[in-house]
Image (tube, helix red, strand yellow):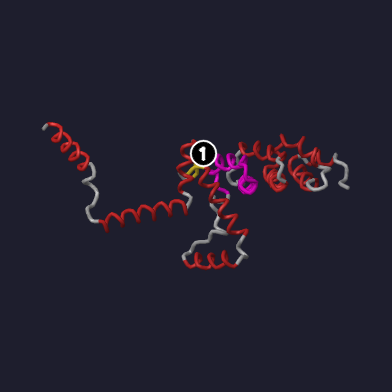
Amino acid sequence: MKAPNKMAETATQQTSKWRWLPKSTAVRMSLVFLFLLLLFIGFLFDLHYAVIGCCKGQPCYHGLPADYWRARIQSMRRWSAHSNEWPTRMALILLDKLNIHPSVDNPIQVGDGSAVLLLIFLAHDSDPQVRIYAIELLASLNNHPDDRAIAPIIEDLGAQDMGVRLAALTALQAYGPKARAAIPKLIALSDDLTLGRWARQALEQIDPEEAKKLRPLK
């Protein structure tokens, strides 16, 4: 007789664990719908990347890790790249009514010195478009110069992607003589048929005397 009593007690205990759930089926369905809606909104605004980035211990900007901002940059680039296609154009018109401008709003504020560590991290990203964006913003830190930004920009002079290398050459001009470590690479690129002109312009800003020693570009 004891065994059935124990089974009844166990069943009662298991049932009590779920007493916090509403008894109404309609309310339960509403809660499930709300949960799915919040999950969708989280993915829509790339919040899942915030969780992933925090787990990786990435540098943060405004409390959010690099993976989140990487996703925001990629999203902006995609909106901009497809802005002439009619489905995207219609979506942009509708979003504009809500004062949302995904193709033009900068995810990271231009010239914001607090974003340096994030931008340095993104300057090594596997996506060339993200790297270009990060390098361009590192060049905009005129009011908040940070010498830590110079090394990753110089490193990007050797990138395989031509757009990344061009962005790095342009960015070095903003740092002037502080970027003297880039001189050997700039001299090596000075005769390049594609990048030679930009390499020489960067060298003129960094060391005018060294730039005068170069042979005229053919």
Describe residue 54's horizontal placement relative to residue 213 as left or right.
left
Q: Nearer the viewer, residue 160 or 101?
A: 160
Residue located farthest toward the left when viewing the structure as drawn: 1
Say which residue appears at 70% left-offset and 48% top-offset.
Answer: 163
The amino acid type of the residue labelled 1 equals Pro
The segment highlighted magenta reads: 111-140
Above or below: residue 178 compared with residue 111 = above
Task: Name the image quarter holding residue 183.
Answer: top right
Q: Nearer the viewer, residue 5 or 14?
A: 5
Describe residue 167's horizontal placement relative to residue 83 as left or right.
right
Residue located farthest toward the front when viewing the structure as drawn: 1
The picture places residue 186, in percent across and down from the top left corner, at 77, 39
Camera sees residue 178: no
Q: Nearer the viewer, residue 18 or 117?
A: 18
| Residue 68 forms part of the magenta stretch | no
The picture places residue 34, in percent across and down from the top left corner, at 35, 55
**Magenta portion: prevailing SS class:** helix
The picture places residue 116, in percent across and down from the top left corner, at 56, 41
Residue topped by disc 1: 59
Residue located farthest toward the top when viewing the structure as drawn: 2
**How many other residues sit within 10 Å of disc 1, few (<14), some (14-19) or many (≥20)?**
many
Above or below: residue 65 compared with residue 93 = above
Camera sees residue 193: yes
Say which residue appears at 88% left-offset and 48% top-offset.
Answer: 218
Q: Quadrant of the N terminus?
A: top left
The picture places residue 28, in percent across and down from the top left corner, at 28, 54
Describe residue 156's horizontal placement relative to residue 190 as left or right.
left
